[in-house]
Image (cartoon, helix red, strand yellow):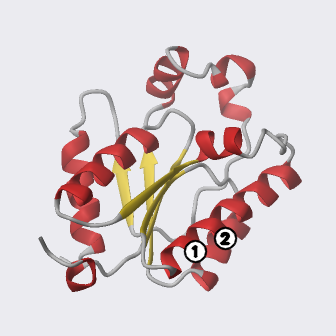
Amino acid sequence: MTSQAENIQKSFIWITGYSASGKTTIAIELVRALRAEGHVVVHLDGDELRAIFGKKWGHSREEKMELSLVYMRLSKNLAQQGQVVVLSAVAMFQEIYDWVSENVPNSLMVLVEAPLQTRVNRDAATKNVYSEINAQGQIYELPEHIDLKIANADGASISIFARKIANLIKGC
C-alpha cells in the first residue's frame, strides 16, 4: 500500500456544477478508486451536509454563500489534518471560488457540465429541483478558473472521469 504523502499532491478536490450534473456520482467513484489505492479519503456531499446541519440555511443568496463557506472551512480543516477531502457540492458564486483559491492550499476544482435536458431528466428521478425552479433562471456563476472540466452527458464513463481526476491530484 502506498502512503498518502507519496503520491497525493492535492488534498482538497472540489467537484462542482449544476444540480444533477453528476457531481456526487463522480465523487463516489473517485473516493472508491482512491481508497482502493490505500488513501484516507473523506467524501462530503452538499445535499448530505445540508441535512446534517438541520437544513438551517435557506436558499437566498446570502444563505447559500454562508453555507458554502461552512462547507469550505470544514473541507479545509479536514485537509489540514491530513485527509484527502472530496467535496461534491454546488457553490454558485465567484466569491466562494475566490475564497477557496486564496484559503485552501493544494486544492483542485473540477467543473462537471451536463446538458440541461440531461440534468432535468436525471433530476426527475431524484430530487425534483428543476420542477420547483426555472432551470434556466437559476443564478449560477460558473467558476472563472478551473483545473478540469468534465462533459458528463448520458452514456459517459464515470470511471474514466474519476481516473482523470485521480491523475491530476497525483500530479500525473
Q: Mark 1 points at which residue?
A: 76
Residue 149 rendering spot, x and y as whole percentages: 38, 57
Q: Which amino acid does the dot numbered 1 rest on?
A: Lys
| Image position of 159 with respect to 33: above or below | above
Q: Please name whichever residue, 62 or 34, is drawn nearer the observer in this view of the structure.
A: 34
Q: Report, in whole angstroms, how far the alpha carbon at label 2 lies from the one at label 1.
A: 5 Å
Q: Please name whichever residue, 83 or 148, is drawn nearer the observer in this view of the structure.
A: 83
- Quadrant location of the N terminus in the rendered image: bottom left
Q: Residue furthest left?
A: 1
Q: Name the residue under label 2.
A: 73
The residue positioned 72% from the left and 37% from the top of the image is 138
Q: In this view, does 85 lie to the left or right of 92?
A: left
Q: How crowded is mark 2: few (under 14 residues within 10 Å), some or many (20 or more)?
A: some
Q: In this view, does 45 lie to the left or right of 25?
A: right
Q: Please name whichever residue, 80 or 47, is drawn nearer the observer in this view of the structure.
A: 80
The residue positioned 82% from the left and 40% from the top of the image is 59
At mark 1, the secondary structure is helix
The residue positioned 59% from the left and 56% from the top of the image is 142
Marks 2 and 1 close (CB-CB < 8 Å): yes
Q: Which amino acid does the dot numbered 2 rest on?
A: Arg
Corner quadrant of residue 101: bottom right
| Image position of 5 with respect to 159: above or below | below
Residue 95 rendering spot, x and y as whole percentages: 73, 69
